[in-house]
Amino acid sequence: MARDEELHVLSALDSAKTQWYHFTAVVVAGMGFFTDAYDLFCISIVTKLLGRIYYHVEGASKPGTLPPNISAAVNGVALCGTFFGQLFFGWLGDKLGRKRVYGITLMLMVICSIASGLSFGKDPKSVITTLCFFRFWLGFGIGGDYPLSAAIMSEYSNKRTRGAFIAAVFAMQGFGILAGGFVGIVVSASFKAAFKSSPYSTDPLGSTVPQADYVWRIILMLGALPAALTYYWRRKMPETARYTALVAKDAKQVAADMSKVLQVQIVVEQEKVERLGQDRKRSFGLFSKEFVMRHGLHLLGTAATWFLVDVAYYSQNLFQKDIFSAIGWIPPAQSMNALEEVYRIARAQSLIALCGTVPGYWFTVFLIDHLGRFVIQLMGFAFMTIFMFALAIPYHHWISKENNIGFVVMYAFTFFFANFGPNSTTFVVPAEIFPARLRSTCHEIFPARLHFHDHTGSSSSSRTLPLPLVVETKALQT
């Protein structure tokens, strides 16, 4: 964008010193991701308990487990909802505004988190059907939170620390995963202390006390609490300046909003806003030839790298309990009662999150604006590959009991470099690369992730690199 056509309010945001409103935006947007991660991954703590309660087989040598198709549905249905929610709410956020749609997604998450713990009937089919139905719509709401949180934080941030602030919002996902494990520990330990029971090998039926049915419901329903607490503060945040000015074209409103946020007087620039809105070079649509020429490869690149990292990352998170059992880090199911098993799974997942997942996120936050997206992305993919091969090739070495601690350490490193790597950068980059009127849609259209180029307002400045490489930028596409 030429200097004489640059809106004063946008240049003021880009050059603003780090202020209290930046941290408020990080917390408010980040609490959405905290809730997202809690809701998505707490299900892995309770799936084995569901098998014990609803699929117990009289006389079997091992506790009941969810049938493979049921297990896949329970673990994956929220991700299916997330996919569709990303597409719908990403598009809606560009049409109605980030703030308005933000509140809708949050309320959907609150309602469906609570409803996930309810059942229409007592038989297994009714319980699982109800659970899957509401977890799909929970995922639908979560899907909307991804593009909206990224767009809001990128449009509130200044140029100097934009990468760190967007990464900090995403880093709240780590605390959400950790909170899920902590809640699992507290709830299961409390019920275990109050309702004593024997291991399955001693008393198959009595090893799962009737009160265990409350445990999984409480863990799932508590996901509504952080979302509900955040709703008020989300509604108080003004619409982002870039959406109000460049999409809604309301110069008076953006000046009023940002004068309060920045605590400086912002001049109303209605003529300039209208002139920018009439610029045909800045009005191309998502399905236009101009978009394909400018951003087609970026969209393909962001989608491809997201797909590559999340096939590994989400599957590892959702099926940790099975990996821990396979290597003997968690005792055989028949040697424990139902509540003990929940406790041990939650403890193991918390340890991985505490030692690998959470530090990885915050290494990215502190280093992304120093090392850059390119280095962190490439390094993360490389080390994830190294550690996964190191675990997979000598697999039979690792599953022996004396080597399982070594397995856990290396396994934690895969989470560390996923988050100090592509899982974070693939969230940050699309929030910066696409124009404001399409940012929310493009961020999650596949869902969208990484591929970067330099933006100065002229299409001649773009440079595209092969996947998964990126070119650094400090400018936000308008």
Image (cartoon, rainbow, N blue to C red):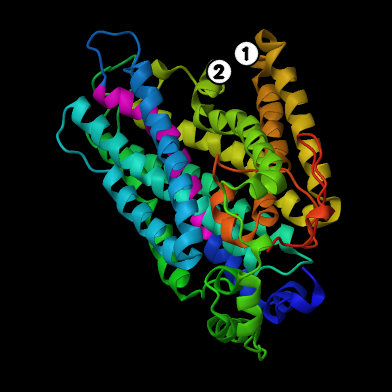
Secondary structure under tag 2 reads loop
Q: Give the range drawn in magenta.
A: 30-54
Where's residue 53, x and y in %?
A: 26, 26
Question: Magenta region, mostly helix, strand or loop?
Answer: helix
Residue at image position (35%, 37%) is: 192
In which quadrant of the rendered image does the N terminus lie? bottom right
Disc 1 crowd, CA 10 A, few/some/many (<14, 14-19, 20+): many
Please tell me whether residue 43 belongs to the stretch shown in magenta: yes
Q: Which residue is tagged 1?
A: 399
Between discs 2 and 1, the one toward the N terminus: 2
Where 69 sits versus 191, above or below?
A: above
Q: Where is residue 80 in the image (x, y as percent from the top left)?
A: 42, 35
- Residue 35 visible in rendering: no
- Count of marks placed on residues: 2
Q: Nearer the viewer, residue 352 or 401?
A: 352
Q: Which residue lies furthest to the left in this view?
A: 121
Locate the C terminus and report the quarter of the image it occupies.
bottom right
Residue at image coords 56%, 41%: 447
Point out residue 384 in the picture as x, y percentages from the top left corner.
Answer: 73, 29
* Amino acid type of the residue tagged 1 in the rendering: Ile
Q: In this view, does 229 lie to the left or right of 122?
A: right
Q: Residue furthest bottom?
A: 265
Q: Which residue is labeled 2 in the image?
A: 328
Residue placed at 61% from the left, 81% from the top?
258
Is residue 28 in view from this perspective?
A: yes
Q: In this view, does 254 lie to the left or right of 130?
A: right
> Are the two marked residues, 2 and 1, in contact with CB atoms closer than 8 angstroms?
yes
Which residue type carries mark 2?
Answer: Gly
User: Is 293 located above or below residue 334 in the figure?
Assistant: below
